[in-house]
Image: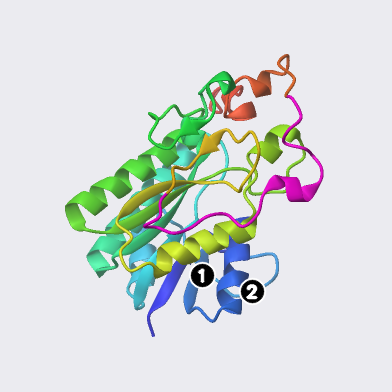
Amino acid sequence: MPQILLTGASGRLGSHLRQWFAARGRAFLPTDIVAPEDGSPVEIADLADRAAIDRLMSRDISAVVHFGGMAKEAGWQTVLEANIMGAYNVFESARKAGVGRVIFASSYHAQGMYPTAEVPIEIDAPYRPDSLYGVSKAFGETLSRLYFDKFGIECLAIRICTAGQPGTPREARLWFNRDDLASLVDRALDIETLGHRTIYGISDNPNAFFVNAPDAEFGWSPGHGSLELGSPDPREPLDPADPRHRLTGGVFAQWGHFDDA
């Protein structure tokens, strides 16, 4: 039976997608470099190990939901292996196996160096990554464009914003409800023609830093917004003296190089 290859299946978002897919009867093959905390079975594989990814991709895979890799800033070698080599191995293995669709977990940190005074930032604004992590996500998006234009692999790149519980008004402006994320992945898997798209993974929040242009053809919109949380309130003003509020990447934009002693 054709199945979805879900990378990063032990992470917070990957775990949510595992539960979402299972509840809806989707056939999927979960993989990660570590076992999940809930003890569910996953195939253990390192994204930097091309042979391991090839073995997974040969198991009647219909599409890839690529949420694996390093989910925060790290040193160069870690980002290189987990996010850059990992993304290349996923796309190249998919090409070799004849898999025609990838949903790629990107990040708003690919545009994290924009001043918050210039928001909202539209989806086609140039890359301004705030970290090596952000660079790796810009790489993955650009790689996906190559594999679509040259090899016909359809892709939705999702620039995921704050997918955890927001703790500040800033985070409430960036909130992405996890069911909104899962429904977006569903849409990308089910639409007849996906093409190549990039979208901000963000719910319907006031004062959002990032906005998606209407896309009637794609036909997805978030079902949640941060006002439903009650607190923190995204309408509250941000303290201009706090350096985390000056750039869209927040603390990522403040960190130095992680390879420095």
Q: Identify the disc placed on residue 165.
A: none
Q: Secondary structure at mark 2?
A: loop
Residue 245 x/y as whole percent: 66, 23
Which numbered disc flags the more N-terminal residue, 1 or 2? Answer: 1
Q: Nearer the viewer, residue 3 or 248?
A: 248
Which of the 4 image quarters holds residue 41? bottom right
**Callout 1–callout 2 Cβ contact below 8 Å:** yes
x, y percent for residue 122: 45, 34
Residues shaded magenta: 215-237
| Inter-mark Cα distance, 1 to 2 | 10 Å
The residue positioned 41% from the left and 70% from the top of the image is: 190
> Would residue 10 be seen by someone viewing this image from the given angle?
no
Q: The C terminus lies in which quarter of the figure?
A: top right
Q: Assign the N terminus to one quadrant of the image.
A: bottom left
Residue type pointed to by label 2: Ser
Image quarter for residue 166? top right
Question: What residue sits right under mark 1 in the picture?
Answer: 30
Q: Position of residue 203 (x, y in %)?
A: 60, 48
Among the 4 quarters of the image, the one containing residue 21: bottom right
Residue 250 location (% of width, % of height):
62, 28
The residue beneath circle 2 is 40
Label the magenta part by its dominant secondary structure: loop
The answer to if 134 sits in the magenta stretch is no
Q: At 51% from the left edge and 70% from the top edge, which residue is drawn?
A: 30
Left/right of residue 51 with respect to residue 244 in the rendered view: left
Left or right of residue 25: residue 156: left
Left or right: 125 in relation to 26? left
23, 207: nearer the viewer:
207
